[in-house]
């Protein structure tokens, strides 16, 4: 399946909103849905109809936007959940089944219930909805033989896609790859296989990429990795990792990612960490003298891809303890200040004293003041610099 487009299911409005304390207003949901569609997301898992009337109204409002993407409702494997979904305008449902022993016990189910209900629920859903997806909840803790049988049973019942969920984030990339490699061989090429990864051990992005490498043709993600506990596989990380590690595309306009991530962060009232991959404030900023000198010669020297690929503007070099002459001269030149190379050691010495004193960086304005002061002192024949 190498070279084919990966199908993205964005579940920010469903699984993402399950993050503790996050509640999207209806206007917020509509803005997020529209931004996701504008970025090229082909499917939105937009809510859980069984929650209440308000949730169902939200789903209808999203569908009524007329976006160029599928809108899917999430349901438990229960007739009443499908009945609630039937009151919405969606033409797609995802039906989640527990498949591990621990969830069978926690939800008061047993394996024979699974085999009895699966064909019944899928059969009913196929009558009402154009697209039916079936989920194996807690697949990463399920018996392999049960999982194999589940995939085949879902396919035979008429489901168009089967989701394998690493519900508590315990898989690693190798195990994820092995599972999808096995299931792809069992299911054949016609059934869509999806991976849904959580980030409890910090491997959601890596596991998602490995799932695609192993045979998954669909993946679910959330913007900023928003979700319960440690969150989900982040849309922005997965999209860029697929492109730059596998050469696979998901049909996204990645130049919209930065704005999309800011929108969701604002609506969720959760700031983006400065070092967050892809969209963090510092991921295209450099202070190290070695890095800045190389970047001035070749922007790809210490960056995996150009910042504008994700809708970011170029960042000025940070000035601090680790700065070097090339970076300092470049920033000063941008401010119209030319300094001789012989003066750089003293500028750097003053910068490092200030950076150590405040345990942080020095602003470009402060750098300019330091440089001008030293230039003036040099013209007057003195070379003393106050700390």
Image: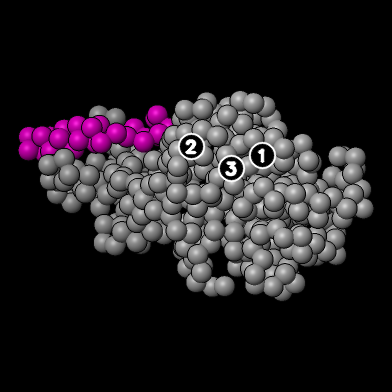
Of the 4 image quadrants, the one containing the N terminus is: bottom right
- Answer with the quarter of the image where residue 207 lies: bottom right
Using the numbered discs, state the Cα–Cα distance from disc 2 to disc 1 in whole angstroms: 15 Å
Q: Which mark is residue 86?
A: 1
Give the residues in magenta. 354-382
Does the magenta run of residues contain 195?
no
Of the 4 image quadrants, the one containing the C terminus is: top left
- Please name the residue shown 59% across and 47% down the image: 91
Q: Secondary structure under badge 1?
A: helix
Q: Of the two numbered discs 2 and 1 on the same chain, state the one appearing first in sequence.
A: 2
How would you classify the magenta stretch by its main secondary structure? helix
Residue 368 visible in the current orientation:
yes
Q: Position of residue 56 (x, y in %)?
A: 61, 31
- Answer with the quarter of the image where residue 227 lies: top right
**Residue denoted by label 2:** 64
Q: Secondary structure under badge 2?
A: loop
88, 34: nearer the viewer: 88
Q: Position of residue 198 (x, y in %)?
A: 66, 47
- Answer with the quarter of the image where residue 161 lies: bottom right
**Residue denoted by label 3:** 90
């Amino acid at each position: 399946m190498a070279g084919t487009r990966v199908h993205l299911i964005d579940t920010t409005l469903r699984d993402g909103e399950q993050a503790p304390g996050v509640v999207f207003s209806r206007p917020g949901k509509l803005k997020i849905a529209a931004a996701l569609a504008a970025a090229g997301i082909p499917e939105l898992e937009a809510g859980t109809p069984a929650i209440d009337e308000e949730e169902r109204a939200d789903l209808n409002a999203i569908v009524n936007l007329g976006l160029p993407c599928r809108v899917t409702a999430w349901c438990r494997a229960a007739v009443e959940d499908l009945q609630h979904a039937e009151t919405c305008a969606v033409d797609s449902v995802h039906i989640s089944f527990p498949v591990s022993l621990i969830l069978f016990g926690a939800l008061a189910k047993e394996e024979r219930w699974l085999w009895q209900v699966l064909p019944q629920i899928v059969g009913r859903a196929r009558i009402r909805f154009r697209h039916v997806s079936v989920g194996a909840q807690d697949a990463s803790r399920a018996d392999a033989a049960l999982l194999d049988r589940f995939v085949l049973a879902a396919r035979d019942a008429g489901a168009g896609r089967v989701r394998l969920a690493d519900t508590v984030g315990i898989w690693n990339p190798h195990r994820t790859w092995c599972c999808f490699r096995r299931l792809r061989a069992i299911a054949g090429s016609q059934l869509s296989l999806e991976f849904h990864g959580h980030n409890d051990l910090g491997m959601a992005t890596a596991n998602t990429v490995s799932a695609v490498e192993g045979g998954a043709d669909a993946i679910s993600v959330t913007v900023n990795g928003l979700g319960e506990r440690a969150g989900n596989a982040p849309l922005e990380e997965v999209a860029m990792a697929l492109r730059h590690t596998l050469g696979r595309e998901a049909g996204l306009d990645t130049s919209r990612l930065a704005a999309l991530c800011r929108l969701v962060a604002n609506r969720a009232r959760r700031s983006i960490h400065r070092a967050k991959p892809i969209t963090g404030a510092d991921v295209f900023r450099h202070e190290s003298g070695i890095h800045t000198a190389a970047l001035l010669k070749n922007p790809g020297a210490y960056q995996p891809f150009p910042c504008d690929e994700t809708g970011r503007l170029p960042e000025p070099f940070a000035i601090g303890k680790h700065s070097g002459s090339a970076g300092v001269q470049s920033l000063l030149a941008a401010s119209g200040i030319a300094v001789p190379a012989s003066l750089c050691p003293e500028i750097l010495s003053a910068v490092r004293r200030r950076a150590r004193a405040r345990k942080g960086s020095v602003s470009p304005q402060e750098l300019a003041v330091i440089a001008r002061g030293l230039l003036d002192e040099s013209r007057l024949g003195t070379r003393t610099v106050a700390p």
